[in-house]
Image: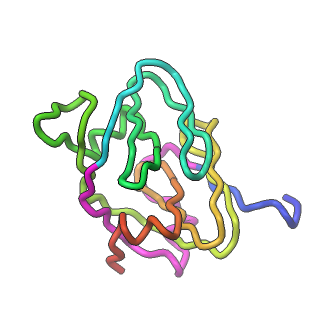
Amino acid sequence: MSPTAAPLFRSSRQPGYSSGISSDPRRVVARKFEREVQVRFTTEACTVQSLEGLVQARPGDAILTGAGGEHWRVSKARFPEKYRPVPPTRAGEDGRYVSLRTRVLALQLREAFEVLLADGQSRLNGQVGDWLVDYGDGSLGIVSHAIFPTTYEILG
């Protein structure tokens, strides 16, 4: 790696937290706030423009829209673990969902960095001060320094 290359973090696709993040003394344990989002389930492969980069979506994946209009993808396999429908929406239908209060490990980075997602294709770009988030299910993500405090509460 050249001196100017941004550090690259890779999603492992294996259950459990990354040892690199869990052993870092700067990491925090955080819990997601319950927040309502708009969800649509894609019927075909597509790309999603998130704040951090282009993400590949497969049929059945959820494409979410946050309060600020930002978009992100959650895989079909992981979506039920992270969100529940808000009535009258039924599970698996497009509509309103609320995030579950899941625990994560998070590390605020002091340099630009990249994350290779669990799909092995999508690469996100983090800026100085953004948070590297380990969801504990083998996937990593990036949450901007502006969005993190409105999405997560730090537990310790």
Q: Quadrant of residue 155?
A: bottom left
Q: Residue at x 64, y 36 (%)?
A: 121
Q: Position of residue 138 (x, y in %)?
A: 47, 48
**Chain part drawn in magenta:** 11-36
Asked if the magenta segment contains residue 27, the reply would be: yes
Which residue ends up furthest to the right in the rendered image? Answer: 2
Which residue is more in the foreground, 77 or 53? 53
Q: Quadrant of the N terminus?
A: bottom right
Please, is residue 142 above or below residue 138 in the view?
A: below
Image position of 116 (left or right of 137): right
Please, is residue 137 above or below residue 122 in the view?
A: below
Please, is residue 98 above or below residue 146 in the view?
A: above
Q: Residue at x 51, y 53 (%)?
A: 140
Which residue ends up furthest to the left in the rendered image? Answer: 88
Which residue is more in the foreground, 35 or 100? 35
Q: Quadrant of the C terminus?
A: bottom left
Q: Residue at x 53, y 57 (%)?
A: 142
Q: Position of residue 130 (x, y in %)?
A: 57, 67
